[in-house]
Every structure is written in C-alpha cells, then in structure tokens.
C-alpha cells in the first residue's frame, strides 16, 4: 500500500515514504539504497492521542505532579515509536513540548529511542526540530555522561550552524551532515548509539 510522496519523504498524512521513495508503511527499519533507515508510520489512534496533549502540556503548571504523571504516561506510550512521533508533521511540536516538560532521564530515554534513525531525524523537516530541542535540553545530561569537551563543542557548533542556515533560508544539507557526524553521545546523552 503506497501513498502519494511529496519529495521530502512524507506523504499527505504526515507519514513517510511512498511510491517515489520505494517505501511501504510497516517496514520496520526500511532503508532506501541511498537513504537512512525510516521508522514505521504511526497509527491514527496514537497520532490523535499525541495531538490531544498539546493543551495540557501548555497549560499544566511546570513541576506539578499532574504534569509529571502525564509526561511519564506519554513516554510509556511512545515505546519504540520515538522517531515516528518526532518525524510526524502533526506531532513533532507536541513532542518538543513533551521533551521540555521531561526529566533528564526521560530526555535521555527518548534520545536512545532514536537509535538507528539519527540520520533520518536530522534530515527530516519535522524531526530535525525535535533533535534541536533534544540538543538544547541535553546540557546537563551530556555533562553528567562525561562526554569529551571537543565532541560537546562540535555538537553545539553544528546546532548553531543549522539554526543560522535555516534562519537565512539557505541550504541546510551541509549543516545537517555535520550534525549527523557528531557522536550521538555528544549530541544527546550517554547510552545513545547510531
């Protein structure tokens, strides 16, 4: 079952793949011969659930028990679908808000859930913003992991360059490649592998 493909790896429903990409939904870890592994399409119920969290994540008081429980439940619900949620055009902003309300451990676990999909996420027009949020939030996590200062500096420089190029409307390809080349542990946290 192939879907219309928009040239960026996404179909009209916010998923990824299609006839031009040679990808059909449901192929876990599918890899085009010249591209990164792509995650599965999220089911409609999970998309609706994540989208329903936009208001609570924005209105609940930071640090409240209610927000903490909601965030923990969402992380449990996302098991093995981190890259799918990050790359979905209707869910990525909610995922960014979720990460901002998450503990360091939850941020690190989410980053670990992107293992195998880093290149896809960095190249994705939606997931790349989730990766930027992960990087911004990861300062304390990376410090605690004892990551080499040069790797941490390379990650910060790559994110700054990506932000600069995107703001100027330029070609973000080289900046995304530089970010993908930074060791994932320096990008996010200890225990993250590509």
Image: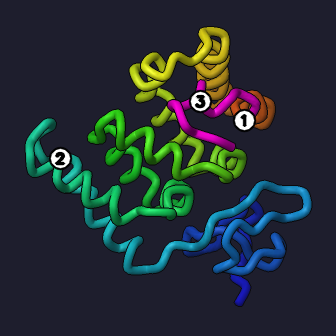
Residue ID for mark 3 = 185
Quadrant into which the C terminus falls: top right
Is disc 2 placed on a helix, strand or loop? helix
Is disc 3 placed on a helix, strand or loop? helix
* Pointer 3 with pointer 2, Cβ within 8 A: no
In the picture, measured across the screen, residue 106 lies left or right of residue 31, that is: left
**Separation of disc 1 and disc 2 at Cα?**
31 Å
- Between disc 3 and disc 1, the foreground one is 3
In the picture, measured across the screen, residue 138 lies left or right of residue 30, that is: left
Q: Nearer the viewer, residue 74 or 164?
A: 74
In the picture, measured across the screen, residue 146 lies left or right of residue 16, that is: left
Label located before the other in sequence (3 or 1): 1
* Pointer 3 with pointer 1, Cβ within 8 A: no
Name the residue: 73% across, 85% down. Answer: 2
Q: How is the image coloured?
A: rainbow
Identify whether 111 is placed above or below 39. above
**Separation of disc 3 and disc 1 at Cα?**
12 Å
Q: Is residue 189 highlighted in magenta?
A: yes
> Where residue 68 is drawn, which disc sits there?
2
Residue ID for mark 1 = 180
Q: Is residue 125 visible?
A: yes
Is disc 1 placed on a helix, strand or loop? helix
Label located before the other in sequence (3 or 2): 2
How far across and down, in percent of the image, does residue 23 sit? 77, 75
Query: Quadrant of the rendered structure where residue 6 is?
Result: bottom right
Helix, strand or loop for the magenta stretch, by majority: loop
Q: Is residue 188 highlighted in magenta?
A: yes
How far across and down, in percent of the image, does residue 111 sit? 51, 43
* Pointer 1 with pointer 2, Cβ within 8 A: no
Q: Which residues are magenta?
A: 181-194
């Amino acid at each position: 079952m192939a879907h219309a493909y928009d040239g960026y790896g996404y179909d009209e429903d916010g998923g990824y793949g299609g006839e031009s990409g040679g990808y059909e939904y449901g192929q876990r870890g599918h890899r085009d011969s010249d591209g990164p592994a792509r995650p599965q399409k999220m089911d409609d119920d999970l998309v609706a659930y994540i989208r329903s969290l936009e208001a609570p994540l924005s209105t609940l008081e930071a640090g409240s028990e209610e927000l903490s429980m909601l965030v923990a439940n969402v992380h449990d619900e996302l098991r093995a679908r981190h890259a799918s949620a990050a790359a979905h055009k209707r869910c990525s902003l909610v995922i960014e808000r979720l990460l901002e309300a998450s503990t360091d451990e939850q941020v690190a676990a989410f980053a670990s859930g992107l293992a195998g999909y880093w290149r896809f996420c960095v190249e994705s027009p939606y997931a790349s913003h989730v990766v930027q949020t992960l990087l911004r939030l990861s300062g304390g996590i990376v410090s605690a992991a004892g990551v080499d200062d040069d790797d941490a500096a390379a990650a910060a420089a790559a994110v700054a360059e990506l932000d600069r190029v995107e703001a100027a409307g330029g070609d973000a390809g080289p900046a995304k490649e530089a970010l993908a080349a930074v060791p994932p542990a320096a990008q996010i946290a200890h225990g993250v592998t590509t």
